[in-house]
Amino acid sequence: MAASHLSATWTRAASFSHYDSRSSLIDFSCKSSKSRLLLIRTFNPRPLRRSFSVKNVSSEPTQKLKDPITEQEAATTVSPFTIDAASVASSIKYHAEFTPFFSPEQFEPPKAFFATAQSVRDALIINWNATYDYYDKLNVKQAYYLSMEFLQGRALLNAIGNLEVTGAYAEALTKLGHKLENIASQEPDAALGNGGLGRLASCFLDSLATLNYPAWGYGLRYRYGLFKQRITKDGQEEVAEDWLEMGSPWEIVRNDVSYPVKFYGKVVSGADGKRHWIGGEDIQAAAYDVPIPGYKTKTTINLRLWSTKAPSEDLDLFAFNSGEHTKAYEALANAEKICYILYPGDESMEGKILRLKQQYTLCSASLQDIIARFEKRSGSSINWEEFPEKVAVQMNDTHPTLCIPELMRILIDLKGLSWKEAWNITQRTVAYTNHTVLPEALEKWSFELMQKLLPRHVEIIELIDEELIQTIVSEYGTEDSDLIEKKLKEMRILENVDLPELENSGEVQLLVDEKDGSEEKDGSEENDGSEEKDGSEEKDGSEEKDPQEDEQVLPEPVPEPPKLVRMANLCVVGGHAVNGVAEIHSEIVKDEVFNAFFKLWPEKFQNKTNGVTPRRWIRFCNPGLSKLITDRIGTEDWVLNTERLAELRKFADNEDLQTQWRAAKRTNKMKVVAFIKEKTGYSVSPDALFDIQELFIATKDERNECFRKECKICSRVCIFGGKAFATYVQAKRIVKFITDVGATVNHDPEIGDLLKVVFVPDYNVSVAELLIPASELSQHISTAGMEASGTSNMKFAMNGCILIGTLDGANVEIREEVGEDNFFLFGAKAHEIAGLRKERAEGKFVPDPRFEEVKEFVRSGVFGPCNYDELMGSLEGNEGYGRADYFLVGQDFPSYIECQDEVDEAYRDQRRWTRMAILNTAGSYKFSSDRTIHEYAKDIWNIKPAELP
Ligand code: NBG
């Protein structure tokens, strides 16, 4: 059963070939493949009652086939009480025939999936429309969550679960010769994201809908989702993902909703005194809506994804007919490629331009849409001052930063507002969430590139920067030259760009110019490792020199540092709120990352500890455990009010619950045993400790490989999953290393079941839904202070899995909630890290002999011929790029090993372990994204629930 559930990876060949032909026996009541049918769909505006009549244009009598889902009695919304198995079956059959994606003669699982999803979509559309109308009518304030990533995963089980019609669908599909589980596994994951940031956005949508908050998500409709990962003998291989290859049954294309998006061109002053951005390249962003149903509510909100295109007339027919096919298609391809993939490689200039185009497309199309809705809802009396009272825009990380200059541009250039008015409105509307403290992940764009692509926006950014300089000068004065210089250097939006002529700060101008000239030489301050989207190709320092110059022993010309736009600074300046995603992270944001801003505007800074939706991450992915919880608490209310999970605490030692708890875990483990066999060929024992680790590979995960090696052998199955970014060489080495360790250990007869190491290929949301409920120990071992929050740690804890980890990100709060005794803690603390690095640089660090042995062992070639010198070398030395153990693996290693001994000891006492597991679930209630969303709604967005009557 599990194996077939998991054969989900949807390749075209598999979907058509390997199912039995039972389904072909299904008799379709109006099957008429030979006669030509004419479908007339009639629509009465209100109440929403739809009927479909099917006319046979041959001489047979007219047949009527109703779509039972849309045929609800006076159905303005759909509720579970109006849907039964018979009507569901009839609706599925209807769609299989009349909204076909496949040929008529068969009813195999892929086709059954599409028909089932379409039938669910009918219900979602009805509720979507009702929700939209209701918000329109009330003209409520609405929040918009802008994100480059949404990691939605599969939708079917989640949608019918939220609509509470899972039973009816399971029964209907049985009638039609299929199993719900099997049909659900046909759905490809919608992987429009990389990891935590995108999955957080998707959890937020579920909570927003569930809590009836008026809110939408905006993203891009990537044609290819996050790549598929294949594991070969050489390690990871990336293959393009194909989630849209057969079309998506969930999305609704809105042919009437599209907006122009401009790139390049120039800015001119008009006779009206306004700035006009003209010429350049124009594309269209077209809307695709994905309905997001809430749990046990009619509210169905929207995820609007933009797809980019150029009009057909841009196809150069003349060129095409002259045989210049590529040239003919150029404009179309240029537009379409913007939405091909998430995070296209940006080493090349082309790649950088594409990424900036993606970011601008998201911001521009979404804002035009939001503004159009505001204008429509305002009717004849548009009061722009009220805009922030109707609209809240959340920027998920810095990718949507261009929202700020774009909103300014629209308000000033198109709506005629003054700078002051527009700035006030913009600041009150947008807010920014920071998701990382790593300086290399804080985006910086080349000033020149941005100027070329978005000339008007750069003018606006320059003015914002100028105003910021004024603020800094008036706050700190000019007497203390070191201070003012430091502040400007830290806080300006533009980096390495001359100070503008300011009205009252001639002195500063002079002062900083002098300083700049004399200081730049060693370049050390500039080289902070930040992610530089540098568009200036010419500054490689290789310009030809006049040989005479050498003779005169002139100083080496210092290459000018690149001019950059610091997106995070723009976010902090332009937004009214800045939040981190866990308590410790928000403190670091205030004390380090944005300390200068925090000192200036302390009131902007907030914490919003992340959360995950308990619907997907317990209720639907772990039905066995959910039933136990419901039986104990006496109600299913905990799915909405997770505080009720705390009631489990009093049963932590209850023998009956303990036995049932272990049985539920074992059932989940059995599914994973079958899955591992299918995907990797390895047989693992369900009696071993299932130790699961996600590798959302960032540099910090260098820590993993070394730690794993030394784990005391106590009947464990160590399961890894994760994808290395295609150009991230070190991360790929780690993937290869884990698979090499597996290949060696798993075939060693002496080790046998004592240790298995498994790398699960192509880790994604659906695989996580299978692995997390089966996990018993989960590792969250980032160097303290480096992981902003983590969200999988929350999912594991909810599912009764015990964490081993450092005091980092949300681990800190999880440990507080579940209790110190129920969390395996090790490693240095965040405040110690800087000191430890310093000691290391001074050559004072003495590694533990066991650590040296592990590296030696890895280098000995015991895991095969691959050379792991570079990987091990990164953990050695006291200085240098890619050396010196930046993540302090050697430092934390001894305490990790000792902590693992504690794990072994605890696991040997199954009663103690089960008690710890129950207390983890009981203590996880804080980490529901419902809690997080309530906080955003109250503290940042100022929106209120609006529940449909
Ligand atoms: C990630 C952090 C995680 C955090 C998620 C969601 C980025 C840039 N950051 O710790 O690394 O849980 O964001 O907030 O993806």
Image (cartoon, grey):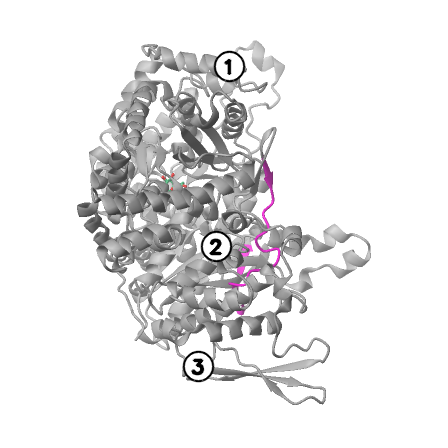
**Label 2 belongs to which residue?**
154
Considering the image in quadrants, where does the C terminus appear? bottom left
Q: Circle 3 sits in a helix, a strand or a loop, which is it?
A: loop
Q: Earlier in the sequence, mark 3 or mark 2?
A: 3
User: Which dot, 3 or 1, sits closer to the camera?
Assistant: 1
Across and down, in percent, residue 536 comes to 54, 35
Residue type pointed to by label 3: Leu
Across and down, in percent, residue 419 comes to 35, 57
Residue type pointed to by label 2: Arg
Vertical placement of 655 versus 393: above or below?
Answer: above
Residue type pointed to by label 1: Arg
| Membership of 40 in magenta stretch | no
**Label 1 belongs to which residue?**
859
For the point 55% across and 36% down, the residue is 680
For the point 57% across and 64% down, the residue is 112
893 left or right, relative to 33: left
* Label 3 to label 2: alpha-carbon separation: 28 Å
